[in-house]
Amino acid sequence: MTIVYLNGEYVDQEEARVPVIDRGLLHGFGLFETLRVYGGVPFRLGAHLDRLYASALELGFSLPASREELEEAIPEVVRRCSLKDARVRATVTAGDAATFQEGSALVTAVPIEGLPPEIYEEGVRLISTPLDKGVSLARHKTTNFMAKMLAHKQATEVGAFEAIFRNPSGRISECATSNIFVAKEGKLRTPLVSEGILPGITREIVIRLAAEQGIPASEGLLENEDLFRADEAFITASVKEIVPVVRVGDRTIGSGRPGPLTRRLLQAYRSLVQQECPE
């Protein structure tokens, strides 16, 4: 039996129901957070909820569950599903404005083993996509995820790991489900939030870890040549952690192998996870 949290109750996934007039279903008017659980402990739960509630405030709708309710529900769903390592998704919708019906709050959890070790040892290939992901809402994790899903589908169909989006100015912004970093001569760079990106939780952690490791890191504009001339590149996401990028399309990045700076930051990230989520 798979247990989910839905509007204050813990129910079997097969019995969970949301109203068909909910704007989350009809118009994609909703928000979500995906986080990783290590050894039964959600990693950076507070940061994910900060982003969720900040987006709801800015977009102008009241969430159907309090922060305290979600803080309790997320680890409780993991416990009731008898999971240790998991991917958790918290989804909130805006309900129906015409009938004043409140939206839904849903928490689901599925087991996760993490990516195969060779992903981190050998690196991955990305592709570029011409799709428009909607820059105006990029910094909010809305349930309107169609462009990103289509881009990810394009990538997997050609054997790539992820797809790169560009903003209307033609600059690199982010990937379908990840943030992107490049390294040149020991310095780290990632696009500004104003370039049309989601301010990723792992992205923020990496910037802080770089400072602690004495690695210069900055946010700025990322052009094509910055990526192709980079010594190293990697992508970040809560579920993926830090994944080395060794090719984009048919072009090799750096030496074509995960670089020392990427490996160093991945080690630091995993050490942080162990500190905050001890088994």
Image (cartoon, rainbow, N blue to C red):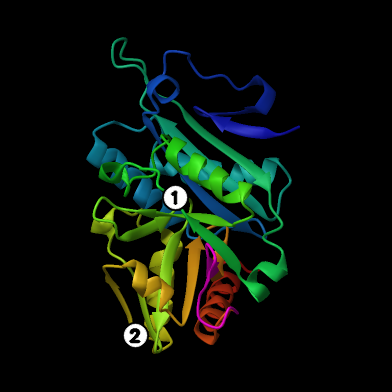
Question: Which residue appears at 45% of the width and 64% of the height?
Answer: 202
Q: Which residue is mark 1?
A: 129
Q: Which residue is mark 2?
A: 216
Task: Assess whether residue 137 is covered by the magenta stretch.
Answer: no
Side (left or right) of 12 relative to 56: right
Question: Which residue appears at 43% of the width and 87% of the height?
Answer: 213
- The percent position of residue 120, horizontal first and vertical second, equals 64, 71
- The percent position of residue 200, horizontal first and vertical second, equals 40, 58
Task: Assess whether residue 252 is covered by the magenta stretch.
Answer: yes
- The percent position of residue 231, horizontal first and vertical second, equals 46, 83
The magenta span reads 247-257
Q: Are marks 2 and 1 in contact (CB under 8 Å)?
A: no
Amino acid, disc 1: Thr
User: Which image quarter is the N terminus in?
Assistant: top right
Foreground pick, 247 / 144 = 247
Q: Height in image: 57 above or below 237? A: above
